[in-house]
Image (tube, rainbow, N blue to C red):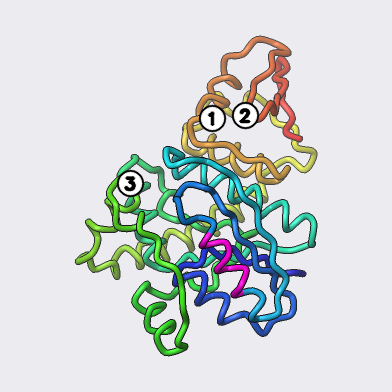
Amino acid sequence: MRKVLAISGGVDSVSMLHMMHNDPDVIVTHFNHGIRPNSDVDEAFVKQLAESYHLTFVSKKENLGPNCSEAHARNRRYEFLNQVCQEHQGEIYTAHHQDDLVETIAINILRGTGWRGLVPLDNPKIHRPLINMTKKDIYQYATKSNLIFRHDATNTEDNYLRNRIRHALINFDSKQLIKLYENQKTLKTEVDQILQNVLPKNHIYERSWFVYLDDNIATEILRTGLAAVNRSATQPQLKDFLAAIRTYQTNKKFNLGNNYLVTITKTQFKLD
């Protein structure tokens, strides 16, 4: 299986690449989002780095513009990475680290997360080899290894929520939050295992199941059921879907996003 490394040119991804550059299965990828004026320079830097390691380099450029949201840029980047994986039979590797984990948990809490929001960055299809390293650890590694990397000036600006959270957490002791994350991660694994055992093998669900179930339990069943057929939905979509299951008339369709329509009959619905 090829290892598709997402390399921006910053210290995190450059360090990850250095750790893995002797692996012949590595593919270096770079998504040039066209948000910053120096995006082309970043792409050229990563290309040169890949060539110095004699590794395959794949890139894509889009002109998303300076007003592009973090979410849209992230979605476009992952669409590119998934495309590379499909073409080369690979798996995604990103340079997310422990500080990223803490920031994401803080953002989720700020937005009013459910309990799963305390266990972010857990997609089993995405490898994160630096997740147990702090930013300080990575800088120390880069210094010791004499690595050259690019600096993203936008990381110091307060235009993005993540940057504001990062600045607010500078003096925050994250040990307790990491401990909470580990506990919730164990709980999530146990919950997922239990749910897998109660899901119908034919993916056909009785509407009556969801009438009296607690909303949180019902949405967890729906989330796991969708994952079983390689589908996913946001928390608001799951809540709307649950309401539809309880109230829709016979043979009405519910759109779970991206034109994924689920037909709700008088007594059942099927996820496929």
Which corner quadrant holds the C terminus? top right
Query: Mark 3: which secondary structure?
Result: helix
- Counting labels gives 3
In the rendered image, the vertical position of residue 28 relative to residue 198, given as above or below: below
- What x and y, as percent, mark residue 214? 47, 33
Which amino acid type is marked by label 1?
Gln
Q: Residue at x 43, y 84 (%)?
A: 141
- What x and y, as percent, mark residue 226? 66, 40
Which amino acid type is marked by label 3?
Leu
Left or right: 27 with respect to 87?
left
Query: Mark 1: which secondary structure?
Result: helix
User: Of callouts 3 and 1, which one flags the residue occurring earlier in the amino acid sequence?
Assistant: 3
Mark 2 near mark 1, Cβ–Cβ under 8 Å?
A: yes
Which corner quadrant holds the N terminus? bottom right
Question: Are there few (<14), some (14-19), or many (20+) residues within 10 Å of tag 1?
Answer: some
Mark 2–mark 1 Cα distance, whole angstroms, equals 8 Å
Q: Circle 2 is placed at which residue position? A: 257
Q: Main secondary structure of the magenta part?
A: helix
- What x and y, as percent, mark residue 88? 79, 62
Residue 43 inside the magenta-drawn segment: yes
Q: Circle 1 is placed at which residue position? A: 237
Residue numbers of the magenta segment: 41-49
